[in-house]
Amino acid sequence: MAHIGAASEATPQRPRVRLTQHLQHWLPKLALAPTAVMALVGIYGFMIWTGVLSLTGSTFLPSYEFVGFEQYAKLFANDRWVTACTNLVIFGVLFIVSCLAIGCFLAILLDQRIRNEGVIRTIYLYPMALSMIVTGAVWQWILNPSLGLEKLMHDWGWTSFKFDWLTDPDMVIYTIVIAAVWQASGFVMALFLAGLRGIDGSIINAARVDGASLPRIYLRIVLPAMRPVFFSSVMVLAHIAIKSFDLVTAMTAGGPGYSSDLPALFMYAFTFTRGQMGLGAASAMMMLAMLLAILVPYLYSELRGQRNG
Amino acid sequence: MKPIRHFLAALGLSVALTPAHAGEVEVLHWWTSGGEAKAMGVLKEMMEDQGHTWKDFAVAGGGGEAAMTVLKTRAVSGNPPAAAQIKGLDIQEWAKLGFLTSLDDVAEKANWGQVLPPVVSDTMKYEGDYVAVPVNVHRVNWLWVNPDVFEKVGVEVPTTLDEFFAVADKLKAAGVIPLAHGGQAWQDATVFEAIALAELGPEDYRAAFVNHDMDVLSGPKMVEALTKFHKIRDYIDPNAVGRDWNVATQMVINGDAAMQIMGDWAKGEFTAADKVAGEDYLCVPAPGTQGSFTFNIDSLAMFKLSDADNEKAQKDLARTILEPEFQTVFNKAKGSIPVRTDIDMSGFDDCAQASMDAFKKTSDTGGLVPSMAHGMSTTSAVQGQIFDVVTNFFNRADADPEETAERLASAVQSAL
């Protein structure tokens, strides 16, 4: 009886069941839709809009008077842009290489089962907790010839000591490298340490039994096994380098002159303070191109690796 | 009973009068520091006395970059404030885009054409119509001097560039920093502008920085100006990089440095340190620029509004700003001089009076020139390009003046 009753009741209820099913089907999509729309408009929409603007003669408000690739031509004829890009190459290469080298070295040292590892690890990782603005301000004081290191040495009696990179147009970019490496190498160390801990101890033991020295074990076995960690570190460091803005702003504001300018600083200045939105948009597109130049080969190798593996 | 009757009478009056011309006037500005805010308070009071509502739209941040971003958003969405602090060639840019309203009726009634020097009124006009109101004039080509230091070393205040270098050598030998300077692009440009004016003279200065004559920009006089500008490096301390202008002024006040080339807003620093013009500090024209006056004018541009009452209030605002009463009170508080040449200057300090004298004289002789470093002579795009070349040149020990002059011309060309 109960069964029949249930069946007879089921007929009028069927639409409701279907509704719940529909809801179940659609609810996740509905919930995610705003995010998807935000992502599409906020990221890709504005990316396309910036691309469009870079082809117009926009001054301090967007206008749609198309001028072709004139803004790009102007961009590459601009000495400041060339300086900014050169600086980015110097900064990017030195920053990534030094961070990897120092981070890797520190991680290997920490991996030797030493005492108080936790404390030391925290100290190394600590600079990452500071914002770039703070790092920049502090290093500006340390490197300022009239306040920091140089004055300290003079006060201690070493009067011939000279370290004025911060005010030297040819050397200023290296001071930014110093500050950025100080900030990020602890983070790279943490990544590497995690990678090192993930390596199977039995392989190392086997090598040791075969009579390989410790440096040799690291060079031939451990480091090659860390390829994925290398890759992700390079990715993170590269995008820190390309978008770096606050560190330079706090440390040198692009000066002396514009000798420590970087593309992000250039883009901001031209788009928002100089009223050359078209040129600023063109420089933004060039920065996007730089990112893609790194990202696409990486993604390609990653995806191909998955298919083969 | 009497107070109540007064109150009722006042109420009745206000009810009777208010609807007749009560409008709301919203003003975007970044005069938020002490003296500036006080000066703006005067304008607010004067507008409220006329029955209008004052809506302050102050966006902090000295250079006004934040304020400009807000203004752009509001203008594009069709809801601009009645007036906004926009200056120099940017007024033309806004007018070209059709955002600004014509003030010709107010100007005609108040006879602006007579009281304003033509150089000033031209900046306020777009295609012959007034679209903005000048508020005050700053003189940029000042040399601020600490007379005690000069006395101690035993030298005279220089009047030409050659004298300046001779005096600076002696000051340097006596262990004083001859010129206080802050190594920021706009300060480099301010000093360069003063030297360029001394070398080129007002005619060629205008040809170079207003009309962008390529021959003058890359010509021999410009090379000479750049050479002398580069020589200044020897007379500033090596730690000037990134220093703020007021810190540099402080060096003159303390006697660490002997001189500074800076606009008359530096006076505020001296006043704040309880120094008296003519005694504790001197203001003289920058070396070699006696007959000239580099001006920097603050102005309020007036936007097109849809509400008739608000429009009336806006016109009243425009008229009030140029009335002698406001001009006097405001400029005393801000340290600048009135834009009108017919105002009684007896209540102002020595520097302001000297500034006003020079302003009147030079507007007749043609020595009145717009400041390039402060965005009066050209668009922000061209100005930015000049800044880049000038500051890069100044910061390189081995820079070549001839090559830089060529680069200056091509940089300006690329931004036109």
Image (cartoon, coloured by chain):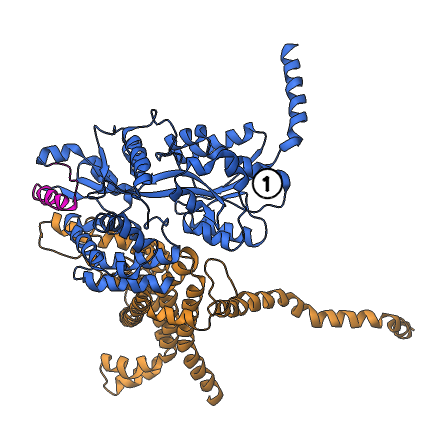
Chain colours: A orange, B blue
Q: Is residue A164 magenta?
A: no
Is A82 drawn above or below residue B194 in the view shown?
below
Q: Of B208 and B316, which appears nearest the observer?
A: B208
Is B221 drawn above or below residue B283 in the view shown?
below
Classify residue A296 as left or right of residue B405: right
Circle 1: element type: helix
| Amino acid at pointer 1 | Glu
Is B206 drawn above or below residue B146 in the view shown?
below
From this viewpoint, which residue is outermost toward the bottom? A308
The image position of residue A309, as x and y in percent, is: 46, 88
The image position of residue A290, as x and y in percent, is: 39, 73
Q: Of B49 and B123, which appears nearest the observer?
A: B123
Classify residue A54 as left or right of residue A105: right
From this viewpoint, which residue is outermost toward the top? B1
According to the picture, the residue beneath numbered tag 1 turns out to be B311
The N terminus of chain B lies in quadrant = top right
Q: Is residue B258 visible?
A: yes
The image position of residue A230, as x and y in percent, is: 35, 76
Given the image, what chain letter belongs to the residue carrying mark 1? B
Q: Is residue A256 visible?
A: no
The chief SS type of the magenta part is helix
Magenta-tinted stretch: B156-174
Is B142 drawn above or below residue B221 in the view shown?
above
